Image: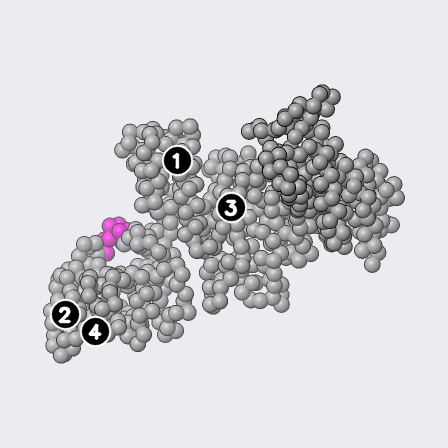
Amino acid sequence: MNKNLESLAERILNLHESGAALFLFETNYDEDLERLIQLLSGEYGIFDREREILEIRQEWLSDWQGEDIFYYRGGRVLEENSRRQRVGCTQLTRLRSLYLEPPKGTEYLAQAVECLAALKDQHGVPAFPLLVIRNGDSLLARDTERTFARALYRVGRAKAVDHSVKLLIFMTVTESFSNSSLPGYLLPFLHMEEIPPLSEENIRYLIQERSRTEGMSLAAPLLDKLVLYLKGFRESEIQRIMQYALLKGDPFKNEGRRIFEIISREKKQMVLKSGGLLEWIEEDQKKIGGLEAARGWLEKKAVIYEHFDVLMRKGMELPKGMLIAGIPGSGKSLLAKTARKIFRLPLLKLDMGRLMGGLVGESERNMRKALSLVRDMSPCVLWVDELEKAFAGAGEDGHEVTIRLFGSFLTWMQDKDFPCFIMATANQVSSLRPEFLRKGRFDEKFFTFMPMETECISIFKACLMRQKNCIRWKDIGTPVREGDIVGRTSGRLSRGEEEELELGLRKVLDAAASFPCKFMTGADIQSVVSQAFEDLYLAALESDPEALFFTVDELSDKLIQALAQTKTYGETDLENIGRMWIEMKKHNFLPAAGRGADLIPFEEFSIQTNSFGETFRNGEGLDSLYDRKMRNVICQEIERQIAE
């Protein structure tokens, strides 16, 4: 049994007894309301499901021909037609037949509401007539003269003062419905309710019944995990998933791999149907250079998430998430996308720009829908990109809508009780709300900085491996192998090829060190590689279009040329690099590259002298010319900013 649904039913009955008649439900699915109606008719016995339900449906045509949109089963209702004649109506009631001319607008719907509200407890008449109005927002939109809305108002007002009015009205509206479209006089008599999703017990019963019908056994641990993965789906959707999974034999073999793949595809459909509130990220980041410490930390958390069902049953807390900040182009977004592969879970992107709406209350409603969808998609990874911009203006003097959205998101982060790992990225830590930086909001805070030579080489390799089939190699210390072109499907290089490539890339970085501030981010490296290959392709196409193969020496020469023509981040934003380091130190961020690969460790800065030691600044412990030059320049910039 669904305890939340039972609570809703009891609340509705109590409100009805105390004078409420109108209940509005926001849902696009009829079966949501059907579960509530079945509970009221079956468990509580309020009305006979087959005899005492009156429905108004959106099935009309513009010329008033075709299916009637009003019908009533059971009982007797006395009404007046346009000639003021009393007419007895039983069974299927065609209200329009009472008129000499077709009614206009929603007039006959209004009369239907009012005549049903006049029902009293007497023999042959239902004590609790239930009026179900489906797609009520469409009906109200057609109600240009407000006859239908005023009829609902009169029923609501009458019920509030006269408990002998027994009519109970359920009206569904689509999820895009806005309260602002309702007349103000109707709101005091309207109760807005949310129909809870299927409970874990409901889902477990559906799975067990279907597996029992098919004669298949299901291990308890797999059943528990399957129940958690299917949360958020409706009964018809679960039945369809089970049916699809059963088409090719036992879907529970190999730890249920096939059925979990099907569930993942169905969840993607849920996101695509959400109207763009969330984005399903499916990019396959095969390799990312650097950021070893942050990746290693994520891999440990992913191991914990593999057993989230066991931990949740034992009442243990799951990892909350990671905040990763740093200069633009330093790999934050790539790391967030890599989380999908590390966790082997759906990756959803929350874009605040998509949630902002022009109508009153629309932004808050979109936020609630988006976060509700995240719950339905769990277990998952939620990526909030550029966190500082997502809630810009949430300060004391900020816009009230942004402040409310910020409060809702913080509360959700604190209270969520389902497996959702949050990957938040930020470019400007100084613009982040202090609430995001407090201990416990995220499990850990990492920062990405200017990559050192070793990281740069790793990033260069990651970019170059996408073009590996165009590189002609030679093994160091062995004769040149003519026509030895890499065509491996594994994507791995031999030891000799690794050494050859590293030598060529070190030449590029030595060339970069000859410039005053030509320090590169990952984005800069990608740009340089793309430009170099474009130049190589153009040169090859002019001579021999079939000979699109280049030696490492030719490649490194073109990389140096492309680098000279590129304005790197170190040249354009040195001031921001220094400012970012100061902010990261202030808020105790950890280096994403790891302690050993940290260019300027926080502990090297002396608070007493507000400076770095001279030997450290000049490259103590660094073998690379590129690293020594970069440390010296950035340290001087940090000292300058602190002195000012």
Residue 394 can be seen, yes or no: yes
Tell me which residue sits at (59%, 30%) in the image: 491
Task: Tell me which label, 2 or 1, sits earlier in the chain.
Answer: 2
Q: Residue extending furthest top?
A: 478
Residue 122 locus on image (x, y percent): 15, 65
Residue 510 locus on image (x, y percent): 79, 39
Tell me which residue sits at (32%, 34%) in the image: 247
> For residue 136, what is the image quadrant?
bottom left
Q: Nearer the viewer, residue 593 or 119?
A: 593
Q: Residues within 10 Å of mark 3 (few under 14, many from 20)?
A: some
Tell me which residue sits at (71%, 28%) in the image: 499
Marks 1 and 3 close (CB-CB < 8 Å)? no
Marks 3 and 2 close (CB-CB < 8 Å)? no
Task: Tell me which label, 1 or 3, sits earlier in the chain.
Answer: 1
Residue stretch in magenta = 38-46
Mark 4 = which residue? 103
Task: Tell me which label, 4 or 2, sits earlier in the chain.
Answer: 2
Mark 1 = which residue? 259
Q: Nearer the viewer, residue 473 or 287?
A: 473
Mark 2–mark 1 distance (CA, rounded to whole Å): 53 Å
Amino acid found under the numbered disc labelled 4: Pro
